[in-house]
Image: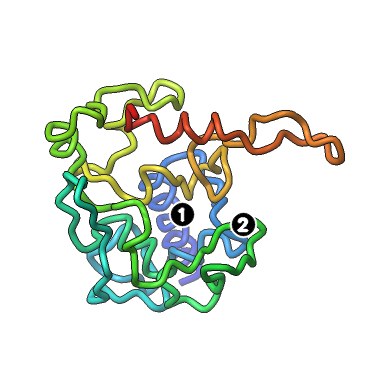
Amino acid sequence: MKYALVGAAGLVVFALAFCVGTPVLAAHSDYGCSNCHTPHHARSGEVPLWSPKYYNNNTQYTLYDSPTLDADVQQPTGASRLCLSCHDGSYDHVDATEGEDTNGSGHATNLGTDLSNDHPISFNYDAVAAADEHVKVSSSPAGIGAKTIADILDTSGMMQCSTCHDVHESGLGPNLLRWDLYTGPADPDTGEPTFSGRAESTMCRTCHDK
């Protein structure tokens, strides 16, 4: 029996490493891998061994809209739905709301269910690029190594939370952003680089050309 348990545990570790790739730094939070994944009693039909405590696939969100929006924005899907299973305030560890800050980032981590003031997600990127001349085609460089925009969309070509945020390999920027925004002059007190508006613009201009 002991050998069977050890073997099963080994298979779980192998499966996790195979599915999410390496290196996996679990940089998302102090709770590590188990904040999102579980080796036992995982939800079926989700990403590998998914286990958020308060996951609810039926939650309806108020979506972003604008007269100039060319995207057909849908209720969150894929990785975005998984992120929001905690970041809509359902999970009690995500407790910073607008005007508050408990993670030292200066930004709220509890988005709530009103996404009308957040960058749209869960839309087909290529469809938008075809409709809007100021959105770059997905074969354009993403400014992250050799990656293109297509490389940071999901497997269906959808723009998701994970397009800009990377929860597995520690992002370069704040809030696990894929881009480093702190490239400004060194702070005279700490010696650390400061926030750079130019770097932030570079991030936005990965997809937008104005």
Residue at 27% in and 44% down: 154
Q: What percent of the width, then of the height, locates residue 50? A: 36, 65
Residue 152's mark? none
Q: In this view, does 177 lie to the left or right of 114?
A: right
Q: In this view, does 112 lie to the left or right of 30?
A: left
Crowdedness near tag 1: few (<14), some (14–19) or many (≥20) residues, C-alpha within 10 Å: few
Q: What percent of the width, then of the height, locates residue 98? A: 52, 68
Q: What percent of the width, then of the height, locates residue 23? A: 51, 39
Q: In which quarter of the image is residue 170?
A: top right
Disc 2 target residue: 106
Q: What percent of the width, then of the height, locates residue 70? A: 16, 44
Q: In which quarter of the image is residue 144?
A: top left
Front of the two marks 1 and 2: 2
Query: Secondary structure beneath disc 1?
Result: helix
Is 35 placed above or below 166 here? below
Q: Quadrant of residue 141?
A: top left
Residue at 31% in and 58% down: 47
Answer with mark 1 or mark 2, whichever residue precedes in sequence: 1
Which residue is most to the front?
67
Disc 1 target residue: 13
